[in-house]
Amino acid sequence: MLKKPIGIIKKFPDVILLLMLGMYSGSMVTLSYIKRYDISTLTYGDLGGMLAGVSTLGLFFVAIKTANTWKEQSSLQNKINSLDNASLKVETYYRQSDRILMLLADHTANESSIKGTGSSIKDPTIYIKELDKLFGLVTDVDASIIRLNAIWAIEFKSSLIPSAATMYRLSDSLKNRQSIFYTHNKAMTTNAQHKETLREEISNLYSQLNL
């Protein structure tokens, strides 16, 4: 994961202080030079006031530049956060799905490839519960990708739908005490394919950060 630029928080007070100093200096100069001055009566204090007036303009531009820098860093941090969050949610989903498929692998090897045959699993409850946990993660992944699309102003091409659909069919087979030979193999193939597609697209977004 990428490190958060802590400097963003530290620079924000500087912006406020610069703006306040600029406003104060400008107001003082304005009050000092409302009346016309006779050049013969100018003092070092007057010259200092004039220099303060010039510095006010410089402070103003420095404040604008600092504020723009902070804004850019804040936008970058939002992109990083949304990308880290989406990556975490996707990896969490696929760790759970891979775990379930591995648990069911031995049962699949013992089942018939003939459609309509019964399941060799005596008690599928434990697997159904694990699948229900997986389906709860689908909402988290969808929400993270929606947020990613909004912040990056893109349309994420990859989708979790194909993988989730095969896992739903696997769950139905277990609930109906049917053979999981086909649904398990289909889920493994689909998961592997779309997992790599999602990872690749997320990796491409990370490369655009140029960090």
Image (tube, rainbow, N blue to C red):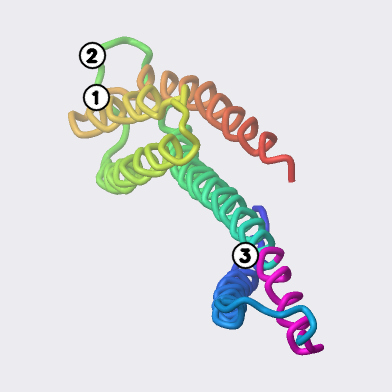
Q: How far apart are the two marked residues, 1 and 3, measured between alpha carbons?
A: 57 Å
Tell me the kind of residue under disc 2: Gly
Tell me the kind of residue under disc 1: Gln
**Tag shown at residue 28:** none
Tell me the kind of residue under disc 3: Ile
Query: Who comes first in sequence, dot 1 or dot 2?
Result: 2
Q: In the displayed structure, would residue 155 be above or below residue 97?
A: above
Nearest to the eye among marks 3 and 2: give it.
Answer: 3
Instruction: Kindly identify the residue that appears in the image at 28 percent across and 29 percent down.
Output: 168
Q: Secondary structure at mark 2?
A: loop
Task: Name the one closer to the observer, 168 or 185.
Answer: 168
Horizontal and vertical percent position of residue 69: 64, 55
Classify residue 57 as left or right of residue 43. left
**Tag shown at residue 116:** 2
- What secondary structure predominates along the stretch shown in magenta? helix
Instruction: Kindly identify the residue that appears in the image at 52 percent across and 51 percent down.
Output: 78
Instruction: Kindly identify the residue that appears in the image at 46 percent across and 21 percent down.
Output: 190
Horizontal and vertical percent position of residue 110: 42, 26
Residue tagged 1? 178
Q: How far apart are the two marked residues, 3 and 2, measured between alpha carbons?
A: 62 Å
Q: Is residue 33 on the magenta stretch?
A: no
Q: Is residue 184 visible?
A: yes
Q: In the displayed structure, would residue 139 be above or below residue 67?
A: above
Query: Who comes first in sequence, dot 3 or dot 2?
Result: 3
In magenta, the rendered stretch is: 42-58
Residues tagged 1 and 2 counted as in contact (Cβ below 8 A):
yes
Q: Secondary structure at mark 1?
A: loop
